[in-house]
Image: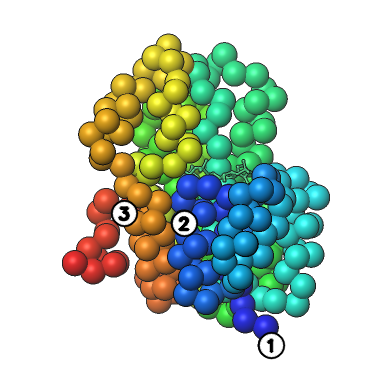
Amino acid sequence: MPQSVVVITGAGSGIGQALASHYASRDQPVMAIGRREAPLRELADNYPMVRAVPADVATDAGQSAIIEALDDRSVAALVHNAGVLEPVGPLLDQSAEAFRSHLAINLEAPIALSRALRPRMDTDGRVLHVSSGAAHRAMPGWGAYCISKAALHMAYQVLKTELAGQAIHIGSLRPGVVDTPMQALIRSQTVADFPAVENFRALKANDALTSPAQVATFMAAVLALPGERFSEQEWDIREHWDEVVGQ
Ligand SMILES: NC(=O)c1ccc[n+]([C@@H]2O[C@H](COP(=O)([O-])OP(=O)(O)OC[C@H]3O[C@@H](n4cnc5c(N)ncnc54)[C@H](OP(=O)(O)O)[C@@H]3O)[C@@H](O)[C@H]2O)c1
């Protein structure tokens, strides 16, 4: 039997790329998913354990490509890391199309992919939602993002009850403020569109961002927790690092 894979969406940059490298450098096969092919190819060139699968998780074609790429392998873990911030700006100023497209990536795709890959999951397999502080706090200018992450958190809570006692486990994790392209995009916003932008610029100026590699260490430790513990709460890197990774 081929070794089970860890499926990571949004693996071409930031947190997803760091998690893919973390596993691949430990001889764990990884399926790395994203829309842009070049960064996935680079990852696969650096790590033979990585299989690059260019796919848009928000489309039926993308989801089919992921299933097809699995061949006969099963899935040890499915990490719903792909996400977008935009549209940024007052919620009622955003077009219906931009809002729908955001929800399709951040909310619908994780649920659809979990549904599609469920029959391929290992017994005791893990599904992880990448959450955010924005799931729990209203941020002016981040309407779409706050709404999609809050709904994704609720999806985790619903699935936690529905899957209790079953063979797969659902989890949720908050990575903190991480030094990734998404943070660069946040810092590039205008005050009019995102009033809290200066706070994020100050965090970067003060070197206060968490590195993607640190988040990958935390994520892998959370994914390795026993199933019921993995599911019991949303794991926040700022609160639970010592408990999960150790002192
Ligand atoms: N950075 C932070 O401070 C922070 C804080 C809390 C939560 N998060 C969450 O962490 C996750 C990773 O973000 P990041 O900070 O690492 O940002 P990032 O570097 O922008 O990573 C997001 C990744 O998602 C991929 N992606 C976006 N839409 C996709 C789609 N439709 N299909 C497939 N892949 C798609 C992007 O690649 P392509 O464009 O090539 O598809 C990109 O590689 C996100 O869910 C984000 O909300 C980040």
**Where is residue 216 drawn, in percent x and y?**
41, 59
Amino acid type of the residue tagged 1 in the rendering = Met
Q: Quadrant of the N terminus?
A: bottom right
Which quadrant: the C terminus? bottom left
Q: Quadrant of residue 73?
A: bottom right
Question: Badge 1 is on which residue?
Answer: 1
Residue at 69% from the left image edge and 49% from the top image edge = 37
| Marks 2 and 1, the one that precedes in the sequence | 1
Q: In terms of depth relative to the viewer, which is nearer, 112 or 161?
A: 112
Could you tell me how far apart the alpha carbons at marks 2 and 1 are, in whole angstroms?
Answer: 27 Å
Answer whether labels 1 and 3 touch (C-beta < 8 Å).
no
Q: Secondary structure at mark 1?
A: loop
Q: Amino acid at mark 3?
A: Ile
- Label 2 element class: helix
Q: Which mark is residue 237?
A: 3
Q: Are marks 2 and 1 in contact (CB under 8 Å)?
A: no
- Tell me if the residue at label 2 has its CB under 8 Å from ligand 1: yes
Q: Which residue is located at x 47 percent, y 37 percent?
A: 182
Q: Is residue 91 visible?
A: yes
For the point 40% across and 51% down, the residue is 212
- The three-letter code of the residue at mark 2 reads Ala
- Which residue is label 2 attached to? 18
Crowding at dot 3, Cα within 10 Å, few <14 / some 14-19 / many 20+, comes out as many
Residue 154 image offset from top left, x and y in percent: 49, 48
- The correct choice, above or below, for 49 with respect to 236 in the image is below
- Residue located farthest toward the top when viewing the structure as drawn: 192
Q: Seen in the image, is 198 located left or right of residue 41?
A: left
Crowding near the residue tagged with mark 1, few <14, some 14–19, many ≥20 C-alpha atoms within 10 Å: few
Is the C-beta of the residue carrying label 3 under 8 Å from the nearest atom of ligand 1?
A: no
